[in-house]
Image: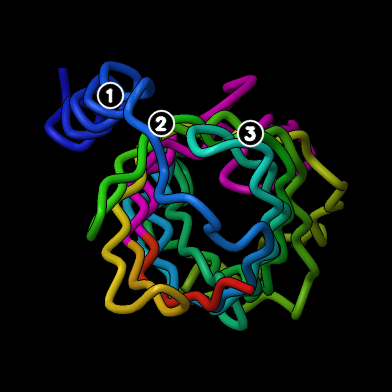
């Protein structure tokens, strides 16, 4: 088992095990936050940085509903041809990525920190910013622009929160973003879905 996935499972287990511990009385019901994200694309071994925001409604001391959106201004990937007749051909796909998720966060809150697990369905959208062909074989290759669609995505993982004050918190997310792959999008590897390690670090305000 890969180390990132093992970390996610441990955090999720800790969050579930402590779900019976009560939240301090009178805790705020709403939360807004912002974060920076790192998305590691397993299909092409590339990592991209993004920014995002979220809104949460606390249903109970151990359960919340969250909505989150992230934007990656640069999501470029490079694909090298596997065709033996085109030994010197690399295509760079210039893209931007947006994603959104909505779902539950379940776990426990202690006085100064919290541990949670999350399961949030959503979607990922890629926008084409052009292609660049590198290599001497480009002159004989008819490049076809990829077609991008909204793809179903699922955000699974664990969350650690530190409550600096009753209103302000710092948060770390570690998880697996599962994305449905389509044959019309690079890297054209024929897979129907991919597992992509995601980390997010941010802050939030409760009110």
At x 47%, y 77%, the residue is: 167
> Residue 31, located in which quarter of the rendered image?
bottom right
Q: Nearer the viewer, residue 168 or 104?
A: 168
Q: Residues within 10 Å of mark 3 (few under 14, many from 20)?
A: some
For residue 66, above or below residue 63: below
Q: From the top left corner, tell me how far across and down residue 188 is, in percent.
A: 62, 37
Q: From the top left corner, tell me how far across and down residue 92 is, in percent.
A: 54, 70
Q: Nearer the viewer, residue 25 or 28?
A: 25
Q: Residues within 10 Å of mark 1 (few under 14, many from 20)?
A: some
Quarter of the N terminus within the rendering: top left
Q: Is residue 36 left or right of residue 137?
A: left
Q: Find out whether the residues at labels 2 and 1 contact each other: C-beta distance under 8 Å.
A: yes
Q: From the top left corner, tell me how far across and down residue 129 is, in percent.
A: 75, 80
Q: Which residue is mark 3?
A: 104
At x 77%, y 60%, the residue is: 142
At x 32%, y 47%, the residue is: 174
Q: Which residue is mark 1?
A: 18
First in sequence: mark 2 or mark 1? 1
Q: Nearer the viewer, residue 169 or 73?
A: 169
Q: Nearer the viewer, residue 180 or 119?
A: 119
For the residues labelled 2 and 1, the Cα–Cα distance comes to: 6 Å
Q: Is residue 63 magenta?
A: no
Q: Secondary structure at mark 2?
A: strand
Residue stretch in magenta = 172-199
First in sequence: mark 3 or mark 1? 1
For residue 92, above or below residue 175: below
């Amino acid at each position: 088992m890969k180390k990132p996935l093992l970390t996610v499972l441990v955090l999720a287990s800790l969050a579930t095990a402590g779900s019976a511990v009560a939240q301090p009385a009178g805790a705020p019901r709403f939360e807004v936050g912002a974060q920076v994200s790192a998305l590691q694309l397993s299909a092409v071994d590339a990592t991209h940085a993004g920014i995002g925001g979220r809104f949460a409604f606390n249903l109970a001391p151990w359960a919340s509903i969250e909505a989150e959106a992230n934007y990656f201004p640069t999501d470029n990937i490079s694909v090298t041809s596997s065709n033996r007749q085109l030994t010197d051909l690399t295509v760079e796909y210039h893209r931007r990525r947006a994603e959104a998720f909505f779902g539950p966060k379940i776990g426990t809150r202690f006085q100064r920190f919290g541990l949670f697990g999350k399961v949030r369905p959503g979607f990922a959208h890629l926008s084409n910013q052009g292609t660049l062909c590198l290599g001497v074989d480009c002159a004989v290759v008819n490049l076809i622009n990829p077609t991008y669609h909204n793809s179903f995505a699922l955000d699974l993982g664990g969350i650690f929160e530190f409550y600096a004050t009753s209103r302000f918190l710092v948060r770390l997310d570690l998880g697996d973003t599962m994305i449905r792959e389509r044959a019309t999008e690079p890297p054209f590897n024929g897979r129907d879905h991919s597992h992509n390690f995601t980390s997010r670090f941010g802050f939030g305000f409760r009110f």
